[in-house]
Amino acid sequence: MKYGLNLLLWTDRMHEGMVPVVEKVKAFGYDGIEMPIFELNESLHKQWGERLDAIGLERTAVTVRGAGDNPISPSATVRAAAVDAMRRTLDCCQAAGVKILCGPTHSAIGEFTGKGPTEDEFKWGVDTMRQVAEHAAQAGVTIATEYLNRFENYFLTSVEQTVRFVQAVDHPAVRMMYDTFHANIEEKNLTAAIHAAAPWTVLVHISENDRSIPGTGHVQWDETFDALHAARYDGWMVVEAFGLALPNIVAATKIWRKMFPSEDQLATDSLAFMKQHVAKRR
């Protein structure tokens, strides 16, 4: 297993002030970090790849799509913008040495039509992702499609829908991830969901029901880790939690109050929590 920490706990862009933070994450004992790639600047991310190599941290990455580059938009122009944005994001991943890119890359986060997904939207989404998939393969990156809960998107909100999407894209560079926060809201049976997702899962987000320190809320952790163990999952396990430091992230994640004592405590407690659960199932 590899253990990572999503940097959205501190930042939505990589900058000089993050150097001591990632050094601290390394000292805590993490194998890697999950870096936000919202700023499509190849030279910036190449520099960060070199820094992280020197520090000894591996990396995954996270990105999102918005209204202007929505992969399931009825507008061909907007869908073309989505393809362009994803290709540029993948170029940044390659520059940074990122092998797995996660996030809701299937549709625009926070955009709703007032109804569920249509078959046209599904076809548009699959076609858009297919146009991106070969570029991902050439960049050496696997896209880990992330479904979100119904309050953050409407297109993919379950393992079942996400597996159908990945199968329809039908490209080895497009897989999926499993997020305990979203699954806690949307799945009726966590064990069944994890096993259905397992053949396609390349990354797992460990996130408590209130986005605080894992193990302090009501996510069914024993069932979750039992199912991951039974499925023989042995990839990236990345902590995703959000605080109040970033106004844009606060607005997107709806975190309106302080959920943990400090970022450092969240980081150290979360790593110990994951390692303890994995170790007792060996």
Image (cartoon, rainbow, N blue to C red):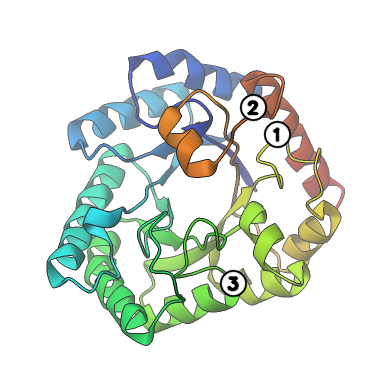
Q: Nearer the viewer, residue 246 or 137?
A: 246
Q: Earlier in the sequence, mark 2 or mark 1?
A: 2
Tell whether 80 sits left or right of 231.
left
Q: Which residue is mark 2?
A: 29
Position in image of residue 147 (x %, y %): 51, 63
Identify the residue at image location x=53%, y=71%.
200
Tag 3, which secondary structure? helix
Q: Residue furthest left?
A: 77
- State yes or no: discs 1 and 3 in contact (Cβ < 8 Å): no
Residues at badges 2 and 1 in contact (C-beta under 8 Å)? yes
Q: Looking at this view, is 8 or 25 the one in front?
A: 8
Q: Residue furthest front?
A: 114
The Cα atoms of the two marked residues, 1 and 3, are separated by 25 Å
In the rendered structure, which amino acid carries the disc numbered 1?
Leu
Left or right: residue 172 versus residue 1 is left
- Compared to residue 142, the image places residue 209 above or below, namely above
- Which residue lies most toward the bottom here? 119
Residue 101 spot, x, y in % from top left: 40, 52
The residue under label 1 is 271
Q: Residue at x 31, y 45 (%)?
A: 93
Instruction: Please state which of residues 40 and 1 is positioned toward the viewer in this rendering.
Output: 40
Residue type at mark 2 is Gly
Report whether residue 170 is seen.
no
- Please tell me which of labels 2 and 3 falls first in the chain: 2
Quadrant hosting residue 262: top right
> Disc 3 designates what residue?
159
| Position above or below: 142 against 53 | below
Mark 3 belongs to which amino acid? Val
Task: Please determine whether, in this image, residue 121 is positioned above or below residue 99.
Answer: below
Q: Is tag 1's residue or tag 3's residue first in the polypeptide sequence?
A: 3
- Circle nearer the viewer, 1 or 3: 3
